[in-house]
Amino acid sequence: MIFTAHNFTTASNDDRWQAYKKMRLLKILFILLFLSSCTSLKKKETVKDFVLFGYSGYCFKDSINRIYPSNEIWYNDSVKLELDTTRLDIRQYFEFKEDSFINVAIRRPRKITEYYSIGQSDTIGLNELVNKTLVNKKYKNKYIDTSHSSMYCGWYYTLFYRTSEQKEFIITYTPRHLPDSLRVLHDYITKIILKDNHIKASKFRLNNITTYEAKELYRNRICEPPPLPEKIKKVKFTKPITVDSI
């Protein structure tokens, strides 16, 4: 067989084309492997900040801004009170920051607020339950019966959480109206709050979501307090110096 210059050039071009295709395929495979490794290395979304608190209503305040929890008062004719729409009468409070701290506060009837710091060993399974219940789940922002809210005598609760993707959610509810998954989480948290073996801690600052929620609830007429009698005019405590609101 006789090879001409034309045949040699054609063969050479074919070899180069085949080599180019192989190189291109290798580049595509490399890019796909790189993207796949990046995806696998990307951290799973988790709940980073979590706050749950239960409240019996709003607090009241006097002319010097002393705070009076709503269910610790009775009236006489000495001091004029007004509703404090920026402060809820919080009875149970639970907050955790992932891999950081867990804070709990509780105010029992006719008692001062008690503050606790809880170790991770007391909340085994908490992170798993919170992430399983909340991450990538769609819930309503309210689970309450608004048509009869003025007749409701129990506590309201608010659940706030922020994920590692900086997504924020607020759910306002009464326990009996929760879907099953949220009810399990609610029951788990309130059992932790009510344990009697916590070690007391110094008073800590509550998350700002408590003030934000108070204003939102009042604006939307949820958890609306009954009107004060026109003749009121004073409040008295069993322990006026020590009773406070968290």
Image (cartoon, helix red, strand yellow):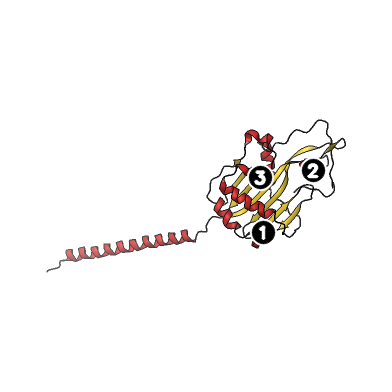
Q: Which residue is mark 1?
A: 101
Q: Which residue is mark 3?
A: 157
Q: Which residue is mark 2?
A: 72
Residue 204's spot in the image, x, y percent? 74, 54
- Please name the amino acid that badge 1 sits on: Phe
Residue 132's spot in the image, x, y percent? 55, 53
- Please name the amino acid that badge 3 sits on: Tyr
Q: Earlier in the sequence, mark 3 or mark 1?
A: 1
Give how far apart the Cα atoms at labels 3 and 2 are: 19 Å
Q: Earlier in the sequence, mark 2 or mark 1?
A: 2
Q: With 7 as the anchor, is 157 left or right in this view? A: right
Q: Secondary structure at mark 2?
A: helix
Q: With 231 as the anchor, is 55 left or right in this view? A: left
Q: Earlier in the sequence, mark 3 or mark 2?
A: 2
User: What residue is at 59 percent from the left and 46 percent from the top?
Assistant: 169
User: What residue is at 64 percent from the left and 56 percent from the top?
Assistant: 97
Q: Secondary structure at mark 1?
A: strand
Q: Is residue 142 visible?
A: yes
Query: Which dot, 2 or 1, sits closer to the camera?
Result: 2
